[in-house]
Image: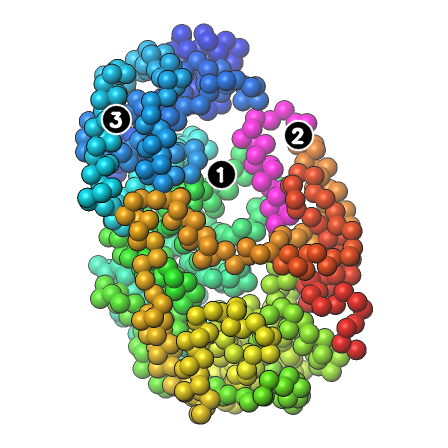
Amino acid sequence: MQKIVEIYMRSTAIQSVLSEVFWSHPDKLYIDHIRRMLDVSDSEFVKKVKIFHDIAKLKIAFQKYIRNTNASIADKNHSLLSAYIFLENYIGDDLDIVFGFLAIVSHHGEVHNLYDAIRDNFCLNVKELDFANEVIQNAKMIDIYENIVFSKNELEDKTKKIELFLMHRKFRQKFDYQDFINFKSLYSNLIYSDKYEAIFSDSKITPRNIDLSLLESHIKNLKPHQKRDEFRKIVLNNFDKDHKLFTLTAPTGYGKTLTALNFALKFKKDRVIFTLPFTTIIDQAYDIINEIYGSTNTIFKIHHKTTINEDIDSDRYSKIKFIMDSFSGDINVTTLYQLIFTIFGNSNKDNVKFNQLKNSVIIIDEAQAIPYQIRMDFLKLCEIISEQLNTVFIFMSATMPIINSNKFREISNLDYFSNQKRYDICWLQIDKNQEILEQKISEAAKENHTLVVVNTVEKAQELYYKFKDDFECYSLTSYMVDEHKQMVISKIQNKLSKNDTKILLISTQSIEAGVDVSFEIGFREIAPISSIIQTAGRINRHFGGKKGKLYVFDDICKYSDVIYGNLQKISNSIISDILKPNDLCESEILGFANLYFKKINTNLESYYVEDEIKNLEFASINSKISEILEVEKCKRMLVIEPTSDFIDRLEAEYRDLQNQNLDKFNKLNKIDKIIKKLMACSINISNNDFGKIQTGLKDIEFIKGVKALPCFASEYDKNVGFKKCNFIKNPFS
């Protein structure tokens, strides 16, 4: 019977309104959508926001559109009028009214600066208000709106009252970090519920339990290791179900990943969000966790290049995509970048994730990677989130930044550092003579697994070409597509485990944090102290009998100070005072790192977005955070074509899609699939390098401005990636 009604309603759009049958989405009854969005944990205020957020969909223009989404129909917009009707009908705290209005008017886009949004939208839009009576009349046919009212005069009075309230907040009582989180909690709840119901046609389901015994069984079956086993026992003994903010500081190679996950699962929260700084180590962490839980729980790897199995149907694709994009898996392995924008960002896609921070455990691995400029803001917001959303945070690192808060509790034993003797860090004096460095590397690589880390891709490639004919040499840089980076990591892990032929790896900082490899000798171009220590963590990582050495040498790329800025200035003074006169044993590393982070904390750290928070300038906050994290701002995306027909096949797929009679939502999902395939084969290169490409690039018809380097072009080699300095056959022969 229901199907008959739906077919009938499709053919008679206006009659559907008169028959009291309203749709919110294609084939979805409006009242079902609203009711299923409501959650038992919602306050009365939140329920009101959800009930009114789509009410202007009841106008006839929208009802016509939703029955034929490919048609061009005017006046189908609904957010602003819905916000006006909410404003008229909600009685409560002035700040709640402001937040409710802003959440509704923003729920299909990004959140603008508060005062800009109010200025632009509180000026009553006469065109929108022309539809108010029509919406109110239709709303009265639905029981949840039986007491609805609307009067333009009363709306004007209410807007004036709210404007006076905001003037007071702007000039006398500023907003604060708590207000910022309060709004994001409301906004994210609204858009998450809205999207979830639209995709699943159901109320939110109760999260599944993650079986701790599976992890404990896996750990028991690992090869015994006294130091790691003792470390894990100490951490787990510090478990406190009533505490929410933790640090876990321990040397590299102690198995922090599984130990932190074990600690996290003891809280029995809805989900775990595991963040790491680089995509290369996300794959590694994901593989470890997926081996344990892949058959029983939803484990997702989430970053901008993650793809979904293309063989699944459109409905399942949209559901999996939403779960991934919203941190709704049981265990979500993602980037620090994604978490930072989830907390600070103003976009719809960032805030749909924010809702899922609630009742979660968030593990922040390599916590030193949080940019120092925003570290104080980040920590303060984490403290508020932990209290308000019942969220547990575990900050984890071998080089933990200074956290000036007594709310954080260390769960490791810092005495572990004083007992470490796996390697020494030594200063290598080369007097800026690269030939001396090359000679030292050559001597070391003849008898040792050797790692060389430099600060630029160009220098890494230059050294690779220098040594590749004399040693089993590998390269690892950001100019390689992810598939080729993973191939290199797998190869070197295999070679190191067999310990037969000695290998030489030339890398940029891609190798530093979290990559599970262990070399005997290392060379590191001068860099911030945290980076030097992270490189040292790849030396004798697995507690071999032979003590390793990491040689730190002076700048050879000529850009170290430019690349690292203030962090390098602070590091240079400490290196001159401490490292250059004397070698450092691993047991002294904690003091070395603490001195560095104390100087950063004293000289560089501050509340970076405090002024913007005080005025709830959501867009400005997002822009400032983007400036800090936008390391690719002088770069351009380049697709590396893996096969000669790759682009042609994707373009044919796109053209075929345009000819299919799909609603716009299914079509967007399929387009997203195609774009993800491109992203998986892309790198970001400098504008300067882009301009040097001699091979004719391919246009990609469905993404304006993005180019593809044809398969087998001379500018790309899977062993080194895009060649910065090898546009002729061999510049170093």
Label 3 belongs to which residue?
Answer: 159
| Circle 3: residue type | Thr
What crowding class fits label 3: few (fewer than 14 Cα within 10 Å), some (14-19), or many (20 or more)? Answer: some
Q: In the picture shown, does residue 457 fall above or below 638?
A: below
Res. 256 image quadrant: bottom left
Secondary element type, mark 2:
helix
Q: Nearer the viewer, residue 727 or 73?
A: 727
Q: Is residue 104 above or below residue 543?
A: above
The Cα atoms of the two marked residues, 3 and 2, are separated by 45 Å
Residue type marked 2: Gln
Separation of marks 3 and 1 at Cα, in angstroms: 39 Å
363 lies left or right of 301: left
The label shown at residue 319 is 1
Q: Is residue 672 magenta?
A: yes
Task: Give me the C-alpha separation between circle 1 and circle 2.
Answer: 22 Å
- Quarter the C terminus occupies: bottom right
